[in-house]
Image (cartoon, rainbow, N blue to C red):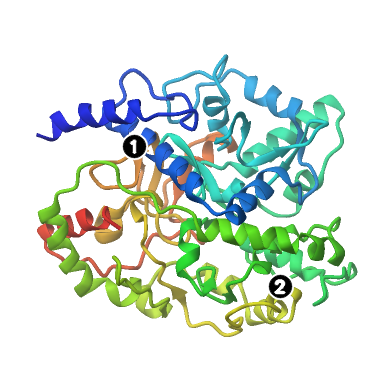
Amino acid sequence: MVERIFPLLLLCMQAASSLWAEESIWSDGARPEDAIVQQSLARQWQDAWEGMSPEARSGFQHLTSSPYLPADFDRSTLETLLAQSIKLPLVDANSQGASLAVRGLRFGLSVHPLQQEQPLQYIQSPDGQMVMNCFACHGGNLFGTSFPGSPNTLYALETLTEQVRREKLRTGKPLTHMDLGLMAMPLGTTVGSSNAVMFGVALMNYRNPDLTIEPLRAPAEMLHHDMDAPPWWHYRRKKHLYIDGFAGKGHRGLMQFMLVKENGPKQFQEWESDFRDVEAFLSELPVPRYPLPIDERKAAAGKIVFEEHCSRCHGTYGPEGKYPELAVSLEEVGTDPVRYEALTDRHRKSYAASWFAEVERHPTKVEVEGYVAPPLDGIWASAPYFHNGSVPTLAQVIDPDKRPGKWRRNRLGIDFQEIGLSVDRIEEDQKSKPPRLAPAERRWIFDTFRPGKSNQGHDFGKGLADAQASDLLEYLKTL
């Protein structure tokens, strides 16, 4: 029955396709389900855009057209790198002659939904300079289509910066803040994750509460670690932000990562109205709906399992659903503690006293209890899982015995059996020597034995029977 449904779904999706769906990037041997997912997500985003308020649309336009940061490189430098002939990751394609949707995969660049030859993650100025925007981490290629607001699981910031810097040195172009920043701190040791929390700590360290610059302070205490970006469609459900839930929700808090030396209090005050619209955009983002057939009987049974084992922390769903935003102690959840240890009370006090926290609808928490269990809306589309992105699939979240110690993504499409990223397991021995790879290649391997990258903890599904686990997985597709 399912085999007959897939071709019919594909025909329907193709008939409904529009300019919003970038060209297919699948090889001839791809599964038909891949194209269904790609085209469904493109259509879902288009429908959401057409229904957004003027304020939300304005927020998206600000993010993709207003340069709030200095440029990182020019378009010619980027095109030189993208033109280099390599076998591209995750797709059966070579980079030469390919569209931006395909060429950009090596660095995690996806296309702007309205401008197919512009990357979503960077703004191009009239003179060809490329300026990073928030979609670098919070918008990427979601199972074959560009989906603003989804975690950018392919963003290779450190690799891109390394190669840009090398090209600038070759051509005599000046180095910029990102090129120099890489000399001082890691940007992201694994593709799809970044050292974002420590970026924020470093930027806040040299600011007074009114955001004036204090350049002579000693460097901040920092514990470098990688984080997985959360999906932006969770924003509407939350009262506080970040995995420890310390920062009260508010439009000013969305501006923190613009604290480069070029931006002073005057710029932040001038841009505040822009970010009221950005907050409206985040609040109206669509939750991706699973586009393939769901076994309703199994999903109904899985809902019972969920309500018994998961809802206390993650909430309930549907028209009457409620999200508790519950902080769970590290002793109970058992996941990697490095993020909890990295942001200290002193860091949170500094934020609480700053301009960013003045208009919060919910106060900053200087003392936190652990990690906040996230909402699970669109959970099927937000792999990998845990705050550090260490678990590739939902089936592995449910059953910790299935989790790979070292893994590498092997295709762009979803793993339809386990729901999440399709990966290859790599030698599991913690003591085994890593393969001798170039840095850019090594960053494609997620090694959960490294500090800050543990996949342990959250073993609440360990006692479930196989049938219960399977039913629960089916139910999670419906959220």
Residue 34 showing in the rendered view: yes
Residue at coordinates 75% horizontally, 75% vertically from top-left? 355
Using residue 358 as the reference point, say whether residue 306 is left or right of it. Answer: left
Q: Is mark 1 on a helix, strand or loop?
A: helix
Image vertical order of residue 23 relative to residue 53, above or below: above
Question: Where is residue 473, by image quadrant?
Answer: bottom left
Residue 449 quadrant = bottom left
Residue indicated by mark 1: 37
Quadrant of the frame with the C terminus: bottom left
Indicate whether 294 appears above or below 349: above
Q: Where is residue 424? Give x, y as percent.
A: 34, 38
Quadrant containing the N terminus is top left
On residue 356, the disc is 2
What residue do we see at 29% from left, 65% from top? 318
Residue 38 position in % (x across, y down): 38, 34
Find the residue positioned furthest to the top.
Answer: 97
The mark tally for this picture is: 2
Q: Picture quarter containing residue 330?
A: bottom left
Q: Which amino acid does label 2 sit on?
A: Phe
**For the residue carrying disc 1, how many other residues have a C-alpha within 10 Å: few (<14), some (14-19), or many (20+)?**
many
Q: Residue at x 44, y 52 (%)?
A: 286
Q: Nearer the viewer, residue 254 or 204?
A: 254
**Image coords of residue 439 (percent x, y):** 59, 38
Between discs 1 and 2, the one toward the N terminus: 1
* 85 vs 442: above or below: above
175 is higher (above) or lower (below) than 24: below
Left or right: where 459 falls relative to 439: left
Dot 1 amino acid type = Val
